[in-house]
Amino acid sequence: MFFKIIITTLLALILGACAGSHSPVKPNEKAFVEEDAYILFALRAEQLKDYGNASIIFNTLWEKSEKREYLYKSLQNDIANTEYKKVVKKVDEVIESKLDDFILIRLKIIALLGEEKFEDARVLAIKLVDISKKPTDYIMVSDIYVKQKKFDTALKYLESAYSKEYNENILDRMSIILYVNLQRKKDAIAQLETHLRLHGCSKKVCDRLLGFYSNENNIDGLLSIYLRKYSLHKSSEIANKIVQIYLYKKEHLKLLIFLKDSGSDDDLLLQLYINSKNYEKAYLLAEKLYEEKGDINYLGQSAIFEYENAKNKNNKKMQRSVIKKLSKVVKIDKNALYLNYLGYLLIDHSIDIKKGMIYVREALNIEPQSAFYLDSLAWGYYKLGKCKKALRVIKKVIKLEGGDDPEVLAHFKAIKKCKNKKTKGKKKR
């Protein structure tokens, strides 16, 4: 309500103002005392989408100052208010037949388009572009031809402009006409790819190519563009797209190289190292991740892969390092995997068999039907010379999933042999 009262008051001032002639003033100079106040009211009217009053105030500013910036704003508000005839009439009054003010001509063309006078707009737009040679004006002519469904002519105007300055906005319009309107999809993609090779991967060009390649289901094309985009903007979103494509294509080696170079997903990289049994890199990466994130699981993985990577499993220094890490892990996280691994290591190397069996039993409390954990228990009994108990446990293992593991079968053979020896020894007595 308050704003409407102010507008009414201002309009009264405008209507009562003297409309005498004014000598031109510089843009940075005030033409009259109330100029700043008028500007504020005009901008506020625009903000409230009161385009009619905004146009009136800006027109008054134009008449009182002769600064064309105000005339442009007045006409822009008229266009926003769909008063196209008013814009055409006003422009004609100001420029008469001259084409020396490109901004006014453009506003008139927009107004003619608003009135759907496409042919009048086309004629005027061609006159303008012949004088201005501006990319925006070439686009305007092209847009008019598109509205008239004359796509080949629209394309020619854009190609002519593009050859002058390789403007990517023009290229984008060209590619849309080629791809959508003329169905020359290969030509559209070729144009964009050529520009990309010569001028680099801008957001507009690469995003347009991504859209076309996605529509064509061209996986290799998508990958090439995402890789180019990632080289410029190392965002996690783009990296995830690249990872998804490599996984889809099952190109695990290329994925591994990308992950290693980019550092975009170290957890996935760790999994790839594990899958490829590259335990040296897995051990080092898990150690790095533990130092960075403090997650105890990374320390546990680092210990396991350190042991698996060792060529000499009897290396005492390595064993001490692994035992120290796993001991720290199981104090914090009673994970069956780590409990069993630590226990088996102590048993298999006869470092502390009884303590090792304690860890194994803790693991079995969590997963009582694990073939591997039962195998560790049987091996502990074997190491303690309790072959009968060992055989009883290992026989259960053979029947479980994982019971055909080569190491389990080797243990079964050794335990059975031990049991037979003990039985023969008793008979001889």
Image: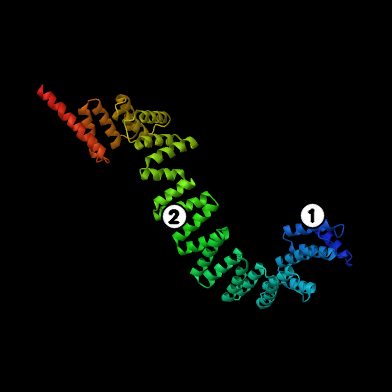
Q: Which quarter of the picture shows residue 316?
A: top left
Query: Considering the numbered disc 2 on the image, is that residue within a helix, a strand or a loop?
Result: helix
Q: Is residue 358 left or right of residue 109?
A: left
Image quarter hosting the N terminus = bottom right
- Indicate the amino acid at tag 1: Phe
Q: Please identify the residue farthest to the front as the structure is shown.
A: 198
At horizontal 51% and vertical 52% (from top left) the residue drawn is: 238
| Disc 2 from disc 1: Cα separation | 59 Å
Residue 149 visible (yes or no):
no
Q: Is residue 264 above or below residue 90?
A: above
From the viewer's side, name the closer residue of 200 and 350. Answer: 200
Number of numbered callouts drawn:
2
Q: Please tell me in which quadrant of the rendered image residue 108 appears.
A: bottom right
Position in image of residue 225 (x %, y %): 50, 58
Q: Which mark is residue 146?
A: none
Res 148 quadrant in image: bottom right
In the image, which is nearer the foreground, mark 2 or mark 1?
2
Q: How dense is the environment of label 1, judged by Cα within 10 Å: few (below 14), some, or many (20 and up)?
A: few
Q: Amino acid at mark 2?
A: Ile
Q: Determine the residue located farthest toward the top in the rendered image.
A: 429
Question: Who is closer to the viewer here, 207 or 395?
Answer: 207
Q: Position of residue 175 (x, y in %)?
A: 55, 67
Residue on which disc 1 sits = 2
Q: Relative to residue 32, is residue 151 drawn left or right?
A: left
Identify the residue position indicated by label 2 in the image: 245
Whether 132 is drawn above or below 5: the answer is below
Residue displayed at 55% across by 70% down: 177
Assign a secondary structure to mark 1. Answer: helix
